[in-house]
Amino acid sequence: MRVLVGIPISPWTEKARWALDHHALAYRFEVHFPVVNEVVLRLRRRDLRGPVTAPMLLAGDCVARDSYAIAQYAERHGRGEPLLTDGAACEELESVSQALCHTGRALLITRLAVDPDARAAGMPPIIPEGLRGVLDPVAKATVQLLARKYRTSEATTFEHELSLRRMLEGVRARLGGRSYLVGDHFSYGDLAVASAFQLFAPVADAHVPLPAAIRRAVTYPEIARSFADLVEWREALYARHRGKTAELAA
């Protein structure tokens, strides 16, 4: 059985899940907790050097270490309509998605630093509710490690939000009122950009379940209102193309 290791709230993980589900490839989902189980993940991918990232797909001797590599794996081994028919355009839109995701992650880390409820909601489920407050200093230290790892303090919250708005303006211009970003068909470019919306206008729990405190931390109502047309486009993509998702079992 294939194993997808990922973070449920992560848009990178959602991109990988969507590609696998689109191509009807079965997998077991395992939750990755940053910092907490990085050593185990290094051992499982048989590589003790380099950065540890999720999602990661473990499929026999194949280890796909990011969402785009997982989409390429799904294209080779799955069935259904291809997603990577225009490789150059999809790679370009993957870069757009990555930029949106990085900015959204920076905003989330900033909010986690000041939101103990969101930090508690992000702890491993094995930790009892009654202990989460006691362990908040550990969670706060983890957020600080992530801030240093991803260098989120290099820009202010205002600068991150401005950057996000500029990128979304670019997506709006590229879409130009059409249904898809690449030609007249659904592609990896569409799902990659749409998945990035998770970090400012998250999709409904029917697709990506989120604890209430996490949903609040990744919701930016003003940005969502400013780009309501793009949020509607994302909603239409999910309605037409997301379909049934694999069970998110740890």
Image: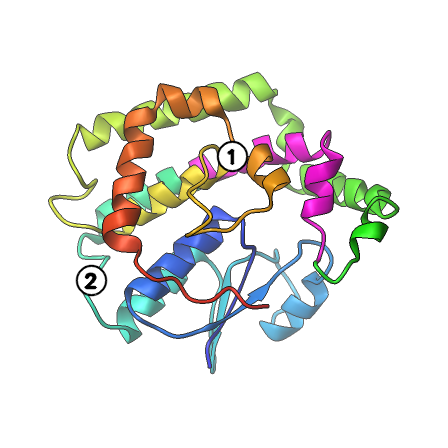
Pointer 2 residue: 82
**What amino acid is found at the position of numbered circle 1 in the picture?**
Gly
- The residue lying toward the viewer, choosing from 238 and 51, is 238
Which contiguous range is marked in magenta? Answer: 100-124
Crowdedness near tag 2: few (<14), some (14–19) or many (≥20) residues, C-alpha within 10 Å: some
In this image, 146 relative to 188: left or right?
right
- Which disc is residue 77 wearing? none
Residue 168's image quarter? top left
Whether residue 204 is visible: yes
Q: Residue at x 42, y 66 (%)?
A: 246
Whether residue 148 is visible: no
In the image, residue 214 above or below residue 246: above
Q: Secondary structure at mark 2?
A: loop
Residue 30's spot in the image, x, y percent? Answer: 57, 67
Q: Residue at x 31, y 54 (%)?
A: 242
Pointer 1 residue: 104
In the image, residue 231 above or below residue 7: above
**What amino acid is found at the position of numbered circle 2 in the picture?**
Pro
Residue 187's spot in the image, x, y percent? Answer: 23, 51
Residue that sits furthest to the right in the current view: 134
Q: Secondary structure at mark 1?
A: helix
In this image, 38 relative to 232: left or right?
right
Q: Main secondary structure of the magenta part?
A: helix
- The residue lying toward the viewer, choosing from 78 and 249, is 249
